[in-house]
Each structure stands twice: as C-alpha cells, then as structure tokens.
Amino acid sequence: MDPYKYFSDRRPNEEIVLLLRRHWHAIARYFLVFILEIVLPIIIFVIFLRFSEFAWEKGSPISVLIFLSASSYYLFIWLFFFHHWIDYYLDVWVVTDQRIINIEQKGLFSRTVSELNMDKIQDVTSEVRGKMATILKFGDVHIQTAAEEKRFIFSEIPEPRKVATKITELHREAERRIRAHRPGSQLHNDHSSDESNVSRTF
C-alpha cells in the first residue's frame, strides 16, 4: 500500500512518518455483532421448527413471506456492517515531518480532510481508559492547537503513548527548522556568513 496516495498536495521534501488507523478492536465489536445477528435468527428458526407443529411447505405464502423477510433482514445487517467497515478503513491520520492530516470518512459518499502544521501544536497528550484498552494497548491522542483552532483527536489508535511522543519530537524539530531560517537567528547568521565567504572567494 502506498501511503502517499492519501494526499496529492505533498510538499517538497515532505516525508510520511506515521500512517494511523483505529485499533482493530474498533471494528471487531461490530464484527462480533454481525456474526451474532447472522447466527441467532437461524438458531431460533431451527428451534421453532423442532418444537412446533409448523410444517414448512416450499412455495406456500408463509414460506415465501419468511424467505423475503429473511433476505431483507440479512441485506440490512450486511449493509450495516459494510458501513462501519468503510468508516473504519477510510478514516486515516497521516503524520508527516511537516504536518498532520486527518481524513475522516462520513458515510459512503462524503469525506472531510483537515490538516495542522507541526509548528502550530501547543500540547500533545495520550489517554488510555479501561482494562481492555490497557491490555490491547489502544487509546486516544489529543493535540491542542491555538485557542481559536479546533483540537485534533486521534481516537482508539494503537500505542497512543508512542504516537504522542513521536508527534512531540516532530513538533520540536519543526520549531527548530523555523528558528533556523528566521532572520537574526544564530544558524541563519552562520549560514549567511558562509555564503559571504564563498562569494568573496570567487
């Protein structure tokens, strides 16, 4: 899978550091419900036939009604699970060395993309709640920006502490790059001095 397919406006020298989706636990819950919704009606119907006097007659009005109802039911639960799978798979957080890109799928035909430059980050915190999250090592990462901007939340991602630490490191590197290219900085002056020496040599 090519991670760069998730955004076409890649900046010069921009490199992807992390490509994140929600932990598999997020979709496993719906999968278990999906399996239960498939199996349970079959079990109930078999028990009903076994302990009742109902005689199944192929082609009878009642058998046709049951068949159509069952088909509609299974189509509905399949679409229900497919909707959650699409939402899980297409919700992506892309962390590069310059910015964070949040790609959020809303239904089958709607998608929202938002981004945040690394130097705009003010605070990064990780949160793991509950026994299941602690055992499976998933949780949330909260990224606080300037007061007038919204907060980024990575929900139910694997290894939230490691992700928060990495984003903090990238933020500090971004700040160092900005300071280095800012007029009046020591690194900027040293670079300008080197260029002047090269010019005088020629």
Image: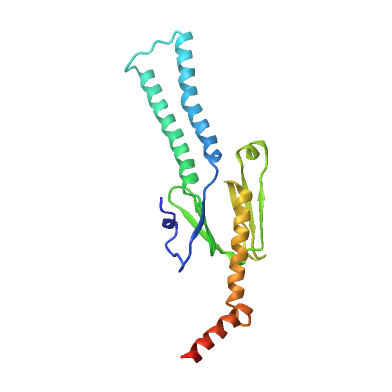
Residue 42 or residue 59, whichever sits in front: 42
Q: Picture coordinates of residue 132 (x, y %)?
A: 63, 36
Q: Picture coordinates of residue 84 (x, y %)?
A: 49, 41
Decide: is 175 above or below 48. below
Residue sitting at x 45%, y 64%? 10
Residue 169 or residue 42, whichever sits in front: 169
Decide: is 120 above or below 21. below
Residue sitting at x 64%, y 63%? 145
Q: Picture coordinates of residue 138 (x, y %)?
A: 60, 43
Residue 112 or residue 70, whichever sits in front: 112
Decide: is 81 above or below 3. above
Q: Picture coordinates of residue 71 (x, y %)?
A: 39, 28
Residue sitting at x 48%, y 29%? 35
Which of the 4 quarters of the picture holds residue 57? top left
Q: Residue furthest front?
A: 201
Decide: is 52 above or below 183. above
